[in-house]
Image (cartoon, rainbow, N blue to C red):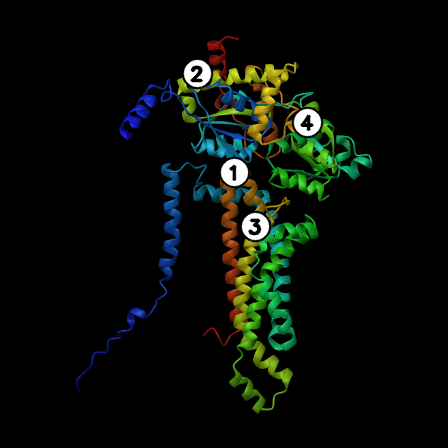
Amino acid sequence: MTRRIALVLLATLLLSPGAAALDRPRVGVLKLTSSSPLFVGVEKGLFKEFGVEPELVYFQAAAPIATALAAGQLDVAATGLTAATYNIVLGGEKLWIVADKGREWPDHRLTAIVVGKELYDAGLRSVAGLRGKRVAVTQLGSTFHYQLGNILEKEGMSLKDVTLVPLQAMPAALEALKGRQVDAVVLPQPFPGRAEADGFGRIIAWAGDLFPWQIATVFYSKRFAADRARAVNFMKGYVKSSRHYYDAVLAGARGGAYDEVVAITARYTGAPVPVITLGFPYQDRNGRLWVDDIGRQMAWWQRHGFIKSTIPLRDIVDTSFVEAAVKAIGE
Amino acid sequence: MPRIAVVNRAAFLARPEHRALRVVALLALVVVWEIVARLGWVPVLFLPSPLGVLAEAGEMLRSGELLGHLAASLSRLLLGWALGAALGIVVGVAVGFFAMAEAVGTPVIAATFPIPKIALLPLLILWLGLGEPSKVAVIALGVFFPMAINTFTGVRQADPLLVRAAVAFGARRWSIIRKVVLPSALPMVFAGLRLGAGTALLLLVAAEMIAVESGIGFLVLHAGNLMQTTKLMVGIVVLSLLGVASHWGLARLERAAVPWRTG
């Protein structure tokens, strides 16, 4: 009897279509709304069409994902572009920036500048009012550091006009604002929404409205990028996921597809639905990179002493995977 | 006259210093490390070579970056350590001498001593703010306990024979305390100072990882965040040197203050 069950099990295993053939690359992500295209792609089987079943590995911050990728513990990473990314490549390890995974963009809510309620009530309602204030970020060299610096420079100020307070973790930054130990914070959704809901903070600006940039990208490890067939197959699934995400939540119409993406994102991030519906970050429909911006980022980090030199774009950016994928599945 | 060959059968217990071997062992470690890095067995990003670290340290010295961090750390370290040590000695002496102070102090110290001081850091930040006071306070707390406990033990261990001898020679109470009890407590006090220096270094790094923009702890964390591993290694080497320097300095001070102990 048991032998017969075993035989049946073995047969189903062997015969189940494609079970053994599925490629399972390890993909490092953060549990943030901006990872939504990947969650949707996995959940709706958009990768499976191309024989890929991404194994999502969750992280707490962007920089460790880049480290794990460089150390060969991940095949793909989907996260923010930090100074650490560039320093890894400058340090002699290879990784490739291959696709768009989210931009700060006008009218799309991703990162906000939040100030304490008393300061807001006392009249601090614009970026210019941040002069001389204590502003919390997660880490120096983070995406938040980068955009605060650029936003201040756009307003004719610089990072020297504020006191940056690095608090390592996003919840710690929010707590510091609540305890009035800092005057302002730069944080991504859902933290700004929570500060307003709890009443201790007020959003004075969304970063995308002031300074659009390529905040997050998809990365390939050196080994994964060298395995051309695998790398292109993954990208086909990613482009499909990206299109689905774009059409469902960015194109405007709110319907069944929108609700579905909201539900999937809420489940994967563990955030409540009303927080998710506050906003989705913009990204290119086909996952195409804003390549020029990467050069601009490196120049800024170098100017501020966080990287020693810039890297030629051809040594860190490879758009050929997206182009091959788009070509294969049609525009 | 028959000669008897004397063999020291306890010779194996003698422990010659092997000064040269000490230096060679340390150098060999560095050389092996350099070779491993040179051969590319481990990527330079994950294990920077000693020469690379040295070069980076030189560059950071020239730009003044390293000295800035060192100055910030040293001021926190010295202030916290001095504050904690002074308080610890005062409390330790009081608890050692006065029965009432002992009745009050012993249970309080016993209850608060086992708390890892790093766990108090968030609370101290809440009380004292994100600035310097919370950093200095956590270091002072960490130094206070070994100091208080060691001083107390040292005071208690004063040789009763010596005390009685002093009494027999007609010494007054204050004179006994000053000339017999306190000097005999000094070795324990110095052991406490050294313990405290180690704890202070540990807490310094932890404290400098929150809301600061200077200091060796910040340098280590920040370089790690930026994946500048060579800079990170410079910070670690500086921490190690700080530890060695404080140990050496205290040993010298002890030799000067307790000359009868070190022969």
- The nearer-to-camera label among 3 and 1 is 3
Q: Nearer the viewer, residue A223 or A300?
A: A223
Foreground label between 4 and 2: 2
Q: Secondary structure at mark 1?
A: loop
| Residue highlighted by disc 2 | A50
Number of labels in the image equals 4
Q: Is the Cβ of the residue at disc 3 closer than 8 Å to that at disc 2?
A: no
Q: Is residue B75 visible?
A: no
- Give coordinates of residue B130: x percent, y percent: 68, 47
Chain for numbered disc 2: A
Q: Name the residue rendered at 70%, 52% in the picture.
A: B127
Residue at 60%, 83% in the rendered image: B176
Q: Is residue B16 above or below residue A189?
A: below
The answer to whether residue B4 is visible is yes
* Residue type pointed to by label 3: Val
Q: Residue tagged by mark 4?
A: A207
Q: State whether residue B8 is above or below residue A168.
A: below
Distance Cα–Cα, label 3 vs label 1: 18 Å
Chain containing the residue with disc 1 = B
Marked residue nearer the N-terminal end (4 or 2): 2
Foreground tag (1 vs 4): 4
* Residue that mark 3 sits on: B205
Residue drawn at x 41%, y 18% as measured from the top left: A51
Which chain does the numbered disc 4 sit on?
A
How busy is the neighbourhood of tag 4: few (under 14 within 10 Å), some, or many (20 plus)? many
- In-image side of B144 versus A95 (left or right): right
In the image shown, does B70 or A241 lie closer to the viewer? A241
Q: Of helix, strand and loop, which one carries label 4?
A: helix
Q: Which mark is residue B228?
A: 1
